[in-house]
Amino acid sequence: MAYENTGQCLCGAVKFTAKNANINMGVCHCDMCRKACSGPFFAVECEDSVTFESEENVARHESSEWGQRGFCKVCGSTLFYYLKSKSAYMMSAGLFDNQDDFVFDHQIFIDEKPDYYCFSNDTMNKTGEEVMRGE
């Protein structure tokens, strides 16, 4: 199920609207996400429906040939992971104004998850290889 949701970074310099925010929230354990976020990246898929109120405050980093990472230029908040092949935003779950309906239902790059943390939720788990194959 998708619905419209809004949010902003820590300092409020970047505000956004996601017209197709998914209620299903997932976590990425890949090495790049953990470096960017100092832990797993909690994300909500929003397809290509995200509009930014203050685009001039959004920094984009080409983190790989298939994706970009977005940050607030003012406070440094992690905003999104953008998957180029799908033209889809994976927005940082903690930025949303309404988080009450989120359902934590999947984890990706589970094979890269370090042993020092563990979630008790029963989720679908995919390895990096499964994700890259599109499974």
Image (cartoon, rainbow, N blue to C red):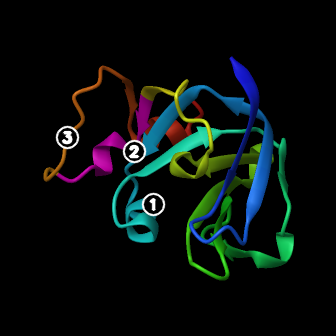
Left or right: residue 53 versus residue 126 is right
Nearest to the observer: residue 92 or residue 8: 8
**Mark 1 or 2, nearer chain start:** 1
The part of the chain drawn in magenta is: 106-114
Task: Judge the density around disc 3: few (<14), some (14-19), many (≥20) Cα neighbours within 10 Å.
Answer: few
User: Quick one: label 3 or label 2, which is nearer the N terminus?
Assistant: 2
Residue 97 lies, in percent from the top left, at 62, 43
Ranked by sequence position, the earlier of labels 1 and 3 is: 1
Q: Amino acid at mark 2?
A: Phe
Q: Which mark is residue 121?
A: none
Q: Residue at x 72, y 39 (%)?
A: 46
User: Is 53 a magenta residue?
Assistant: no
* In the image: residue 91, left or right of residue 28: right
- 128 lies above or below 25: below
Note whether 72 is above or below 66 in the view shown. below
Q: Residues within 10 Å of mark 1 (few under 14, many from 20)?
A: some
Q: Secondary structure at mark 1?
A: helix
In terms of secondary structure, where does tag 2 sit? loop
Numbered mark located on residue 33 in the image: 1
Please state the horizontal and vertical placement of residue 75, each as a whole percent of the image: 58, 79
Q: In the drawing, what numbered circle is on residue 109?
A: 2
- The image quarter containing residue 56 is bottom right
Point 44% across, 29% down: residue: 106
Q: Give the residue type that dot 1 points to.
A: Cys
Q: Are marks 1 and 2 in contact (CB under 8 Å)?
A: yes
Direction from residue 35 to residue 55 in the image, left or right: right
Pointer 3: what residue? 118
Q: Are marks 3 and 2 in contact (CB under 8 Å)?
A: no
Closer to the camera in the image, 16 or 67: 16
